[in-house]
Image (cartoon, coloured by chain):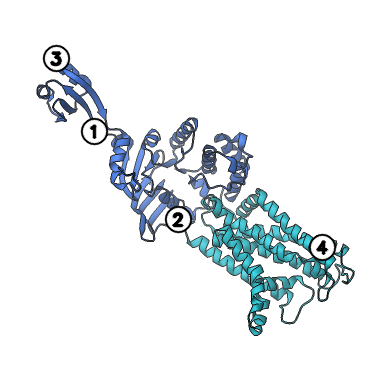
Amino acid sequence: MIEVREVTKRYGTKTVVDKLSFTAKPGQVTGFLGPNGAGKSTTMRMIVGLDAPTSGDVLVNGHSYVQSAAPLQEMGVLLEAKAVHPGRSAVSHLLAMARTNGIPRSRVDEVIGLAGLSSVAHKRVGAFSLGMGQRLGIAAALLGDPAVIMLDEPVNGLDPEGVLWVRNLLAGLAAEGRTVMLSSHLMSEVSLIADHLVIVGRGRLLADTTVAGLATAEGVRVLSGDPANLRNVLGGPGVTITSGGPEELFVAGRTAREIGMAAAHYGIPLFELTPKTASLEEAFMDLTRDAVEYEAAR
Amino acid sequence: MKITPGGVVAAEWTKFSSLRSTWITTGVSAFLLIAFGMIASASFSGNGMSAVDLALGGSTLAALAVGVLGVLLGAGEYTTGMIRSTLAAVPRRLPVLWSKSLVAGLAAFVVMTIGAFVAFALGGMVLNSAIAGVSLGDDGVLRALFGAGLYLGLVAVLGVALGILVRSSAGAIAILAGGLLILPGLVPLLPNAISDAISPYLPSSAGSAVMSLTHSDGSLGPWAGLAVFAGYVVVTLGAAAYRLKKTDA
């Protein structure tokens, strides 16, 4: 369990994280979403104790990570792919990390196999591709068989097979009752993995919701030769109909099938019948539009 | 599974021994100590230097090299991003500094003590005929040779501390070279009264006192000198510990 309570982080006069609160619970995957510069990485650095919050508390499994007696067993972290000395082999890197926490050598070989790095285990990390670096970072996060796994942009640079591997791995870890949290700036990616969504922009909490909760505003766009009549036919409790143009209606509360059947029954001509779902991506963009730090000129 | 001091030391040794650059820098340090000791032993024919002083004539350059070794171990954590992995595994932070200092200091002490003995043996073989030879059993010889290892071990620790304090290899090496090489060259430019008072306490002169058989008036005694140098190392370590513990990584 990760608990972030009213956390603020300022660098000089710039507030990067602003009174942010959320909880990542065991047994589910929490997606931590926001545009670039929203404060995701800073928040994760505070959770693992690399940065100290200006105010507020961060708890991992109910206490401060810094005070932990066996930190790698409490939480495994992937911060950035580049948290490894390029001159060291994958095995040496993992072995050095393992030794600090008294993790046996056999576990190092285990996570190397798990991450699919066996063939390059003794190669210098500097020669690794971005994807292999990510796999090494994930292997390091799993080293202590931790109760909490926190990954910053884990699928960055991974090939489709690697993305699928991460997805299945994280789902499996959550199913085992562990707390899994991953950050991303891509909604499409997170919606496939996460149950719970924490969305931030400019360091503030924009939404603490579920994937289902974010996907809203369903309806059907209809082009008809007799929109006025169609409106009368379709009207009823729980149905809202708005007009988009001389021949266009937007119907919420009726399926495309119901609309087509009704139109056929009353002999109303239809030119187009299109179900519309506001995609998660759109919902995310709407939510973060005002909070985008770096935006292309329009 | 938990963090133990021994585990953190073992981890730092794994880090030390798994990099080619540490072996190269350590080798270069020992090579400089031995090679320049032999050159000085063979070519010097003046007064005021004993055979031991000449055999350890490479210690100034060796100090720079072994200091660079320490800096690479310390600042390398920051320049490569490794520090994030390191501190995620040991979030209390300070054990990392102590362990890294211990590993670098011990490794440098062992290698450079052996180097000093080799330099003494080889230097004796090529010794200029104008200089009286000395043997290991002579007064102060063992102290000077072990002293060289101790001094150079402490220089490696100083390098680690500077690297962790400054977080940049270039910056830390500049401070190290400035303190060990350039400062001793600048102080004599000051008025005599001041420079005579300061000189013995400069890091390099205080540290070398333990390695020399001949002591001029005004220079510190061997152990007093080493203690002064250790003082510089402790102060730098303290500053490094403060920055490591108190600031964002």
Residue B25 position (above or below residue A274): below
Q: Is residue B127 left or right of residue B200?
A: right
- CA gap between label 1 and label 3 equals 27 Å
Q: Is residue A59 left or right of residue A250?
A: right
Report the amino acid beneath label 3. His
Tell me the tag on residue A217: 1
Q: Chain of mark 2?
A: A
- CA gap between label 3 and label 2 equals 66 Å
Q: Chain of mark 4?
A: B
Q: Are marks 4 and 3 on the same chain?
A: no
Report the amino acid beneath label 2. Asp
Which one is closest to the eye, mark 4 or mark 2? 4
Q: Chain of mark 3?
A: A
Residue A90, located in which quarter of the rendered image? top right
Q: Badge 4 is on which residue?
A: B38
Q: Nearer the viewer, residue B190 or B153?
A: B190
Q: Badge 3 is on which residue?
A: A265
The answer to whether residue A7 is visible is no
